[in-house]
Image (cartoon, grey):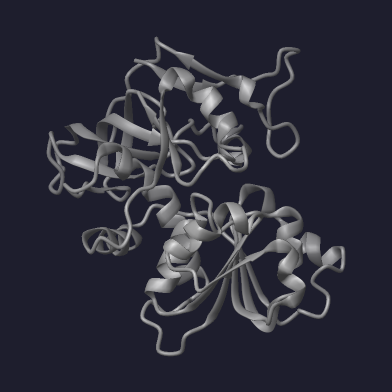
Amino acid sequence: MKAARVRATSPDGTPYAFPTNPAPSSAIEVHNDIPKPQISKPGELLIQVKASTVFRDNLEWNELYPPHHALLGNDFAGVVVAVHESEQDFRIGDHVYGMAHANRGGTWAEYAIVTTEEAVKKPANLSWEEAAALPGSALTADQALFMHAGLEIAAQQPKRVLITGASGGIGMYLVQFAVAAGHHVVAATSSNERNGSFLRSIGAHEVVEYGDFGTLDEFDLIVDSVGFQVLASCWSVVKPNGTLVSFDACSWGYIQEHKSKGISKGKEGVRALYFIAQPSRVSMARIAEHVSKGNVKGQVLKTVSLDDVREAYEAAHSRGIGHGKIVVLP
């Protein structure tokens, strides 16, 4: 079958590794002779992948490198083509979507193994492309807000929430879910001119640029999807007893780093968190409810063939390319 893989070593033979030597996009290769995966245990489904997506930081996930050896691609929408003999909930022919676990991946391919915890039935009102564009981004947003930050799903006491990278693939769901839950949401972006109208259209109460942080009142919760200097500047606007959440791969270890550099000095009471999204039927059920009500749908920026996935990965790093996910069609 056709599938994308990461070359294990650089041209000079140096093994790629995280975080010391992550693979560049030039290490992404598409092969036509990859063995088709087979079901090996209960709880597994073999799907024919109809669509997947590009995560802009996928090559910075440590699961891709030894000793883990996960494969590229996590979001999926497709058709179940084989089930374990003990399977009760899914049948051959079911249309499903979801996110494969980071420690396995493998959905940049014509066929992939996913688990029954990762897959849910695809709503009929979503295309393959729209369905694939939802899970990873929406799951991350749902878990950041309601699982890790502990935000109320139906606010009795609305919180003041700041979302950085608000117009991005995950940020747009953070905004929509927090607004739908009844909280006051301020969306931060690099360009109000470029992204302001879009962010207001999805419900943001206020839109600010990162340079405006010095003029803002403090927040109960900040969810950062940018990292680097933007994440560092968040300490100045989080309440002393507030919560700061980040999940971008580049932010791994930020809590200790910011403490050692004095960036978080004076905010020792802040509950600072880093997490990696996990497949979850609970999260997917909440997302499905939003979909059924028409509150959200997968935002597709453009579609590309699997043969062009390397260029698509590079494009995902570009600013100002638009709103939504780049969808990969095997």
Which of the image's four quarters has the N terminus? top left
Q: Quadrant of residue 229?
A: bottom right
Which of the image's four quarters has the C terminus? top left
Q: Looking at the picture, tell me which residue is in the foreground, 17 or 310.
A: 310
Q: Position of residue 41 (x, y in %)?
A: 27, 37
Taking 126 as reference, is 74 left or right?
A: right
Residue at the extreme bottom of the image, as rendered: 157
Q: Looking at the picture, tell me which residue is in the foreground, 119 or 186.
A: 186
Q: Position of residue 90 (x, y in %)?
A: 15, 44
Taking 196 as reference, is 290 left or right?
A: left
In the rendered image, the vertical position of residue 159 relative to residue 273, given as above or below: below
In the rendered image, the vertical position of residue 119 relative to residue 80, given as above or below: below
Q: Position of residue 156 (x, y in %)?
A: 40, 89
Residue 262 appears in the rendering:
yes
- Which residue is depicted at the point 30% across and 30% down? 49
Q: Looking at the picture, tell me which residue is in the foreground, 252 or 68.
A: 252
